[in-house]
Image (spheres, grey):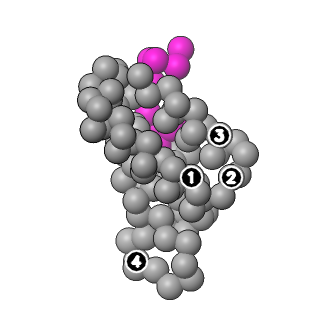
């Protein structure tokens, strides 16, 4: 059910789109799918990946002054890309 979420992640990495827009839009879309129970229809691995992207998006802070645990644009892109690279994603085969 979460093909749109996954597509937004891939587009963010591919198109180098604005990280703040991605984070805000992804968080909103993920919460909507969570609240409608649409995420329950996903493969457990896919669900975990999408939930992890949610956490990473939530830790994005585009301001120059950020907490040590928050990510700038490069940190967000690197961690999201690493997450997708390291995930065992049978639903993409």
Secondary structure at numbered mark 1: helix
The residue under label 4 is 68
Q: Earlier in the sequence, mark 2 or mark 4?
A: 2
Quarter-wise, where is residue 45 in the image? top left
Going from the N terminus, do you reach mark 2 or mark 3 first? 3
Q: Position of residue 87 (x, y in %)?
A: 44, 33
The x and y percentages for residue 67 are: 40, 79
> Does the CB distance between marks 4 and 1 fall below 8 Å?
no
Question: In the image, is 33 to the left or to the right of 29?
Answer: left
Whether residues under marks 3 and 1 lie with C-beta atoms below 8 angstroms apart, the answer is no
Q: Which residue is mark 1?
A: 22
Query: Is residue 17 shown left or right of residue 73?
Result: right
Report if the CB atoms under discs 1 and 2 are less than 8 Å apart. yes
Of pointers 4 and 1, the one earlier in the residue sequence: 1
Which badge, 3 or 1, comes first in the chain's sequence? 3
First in sequence: mark 1 vs mark 2? 2
> Whole-Å distance between the Cαs marked 2 and 3?
8 Å
Residue receiving disc 2: 17
Residue shown at 29% from the left, 32% from the top: 36
Percent of width and height locating residue 26: 48, 47
């Amino acid at each position: 059910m979460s093909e749109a979420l996954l597509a937004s992640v891939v587009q963010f990495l591919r198109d180098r789109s604005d990280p703040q827009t991605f984070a805000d839009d992804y968080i909103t879309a993920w919460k909507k799918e969570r609240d409608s129970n649409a995420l329950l229809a996903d493969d457990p691995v896919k669900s975990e990946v999408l939930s992890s992207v949610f956490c990473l998006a939530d830790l994005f802070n585009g301001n120059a002054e950020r907490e040590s645990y928050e990510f700038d644009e490069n940190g967000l892109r690197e961690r999201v890309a690493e997450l997708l690279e390291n995930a065992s994603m049978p639903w993409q085969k």
